Image (spheres, rainbow, N blue to C red):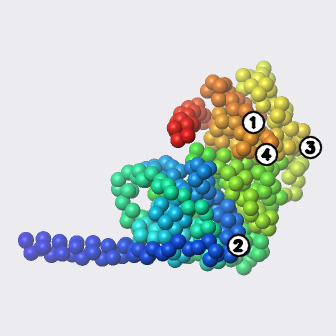
Amino acid sequence: MGRTLATVLVVVLIILAALFFLIRKPSIAAVETPAASSFSAEQVERGRVLAGIGNCATCHTTAEDKPYAGGRDFPTGFGTLYSTNITPHPENGIGRWSRDAFVRSMREGIARDGSYLYPAFPYTHFKNLSDEDLDALYAYLMTLEPVAYTPPENAMHFPFNLRFLQWGWQLLFFDSKPIQPDPQQSDEWNRGAYLAEGAGHCTACHSPRNLFGAEKKGRAYAGALIDNWYAPALNPEQPVPVHWDTDTLYSYLREGRADYQGVAVGSMGEVVHRGLQRAPDSDIHALAAYLASLAGPAKVDGAARRAGELIEAAHRRTDGDRSHGENLYISACAACHYNAANNPMALRAELSLNSAVTAGDPTNLLRVLLQGVPADEGSPGIVMPDFASLSNADIASLAQFLRKRANLPPWEGLDKRLEELRQTLGQAASHAGEKQ
């Protein structure tokens, strides 16, 4: 009996030792921080554009005077993660990281010290980037102003605080093979796919995730709730009555507005107005071409006519005796959002066409009603006041009338979602005030 137990123990130890050496990743030696002069101006600018397309600053910045210094919190079902300092500070940032250490983190999700990175950092997409683009990103980050700031420690629940378990996550969900061009598609389409699936990591927000936080590959671009914003579907399930095409997507990605679909706010507003600002028009056109193709064969013929018909139908759709929701729409919304059928205006979005109203999830509409759209978040010069002073019953009545006006069924669970958002946004505002 004792010999059998000893044999089992030896076997277990051998298996554990083998797993340790299989899982363990070596550290990469620290280097002296590269001199900014060692990179060309063209390379640094290319990296700046790529960092914008990847919206790196939004995730790695909590204070304007500490850009890229990290510290932004990301609450998840597994605990709270904090973004890291990616300035070239030698102690607090990545100043001692070699080019090879940086590339490994981007392509394999392994830090310089050999520890596994959590996939909230989208290395699952960055592995698609070319050597030249990774070199450019490295050059850009290494020429930033070093910031002496250490973000808070992650607060992950056990056992998710054990980083080596990410080896199992990678084994199950990470495909390290980079994206390949599709020979059946145009150069522009392939460029858009490369940007969207690589630096842009668009599916990270627009795709639902499984219980382990991995994107559902079979549901790419099917829409998802993330950071208390709803990233709507871009595949054939997209919730807009007039589907996106290359022209409307270009306008939206370049200017933050499209006549039939509305304006970019919230997380998408940050992507457009901060991230994509420096991207050349050719890249914006490429992204538009690729993303428009996700809905299937183009259906652009008659888009204006269909939009006009839908707007006219919305104008005729009332509650008869003027419900409370309709009265609120007339008094609070119609002055700005009432569009002529033959002249929809993106900056004064026609709500019967807008995805905030037509999506199956009411989060975006409720957030805009509660928070408004400040001048520095929406399209330049356009603001929308918040209606947080309205009662939950008022907001629910208004929201459900807007659904009826768009010829859609009422949202289920609206009252509960509204109360959740009031509490969450209130806590976020309080937390922001404490930081200041």
Image marks 1 and 4: residues in contact by CB distance under 8 Å: no
Tag 2: amino acid: Ala
**Residue 175, position as x, y percentages in the image:** 52, 72
Q: Secondary structure at mark 1?
A: loop
Q: Which residue is mark 4?
A: 380
Please name which of the two marks, 1 or 2, marks the residue nearer to the observer. Answer: 2
Tag 4: amino acid: Pro
Q: Distance from label 4 to label 2 (Cα)?
A: 30 Å
Q: Distance from label 3 to label 1 (Cα)?
A: 24 Å
Q: Distance from label 4 to label 3 (Cα)?
A: 24 Å
Tag 1: amino acid: Met
Q: Secondary structure at mark 2?
A: helix
Q: Secondary structure at mark 4?
A: loop
88 versus 69 height, above or below: below
Q: Distance from label 1 to label 2 (Cα)?
A: 40 Å
- The one nearer the camera, 215 or 408, is 215
Picture quarter with the C terminus: top right
Quarter of the view holding residue 351: top right
Q: Which residue is mark 1?
A: 384
Image point (35%, 53%), residue name: 158
Image point (32%, 73%), residue name: 20
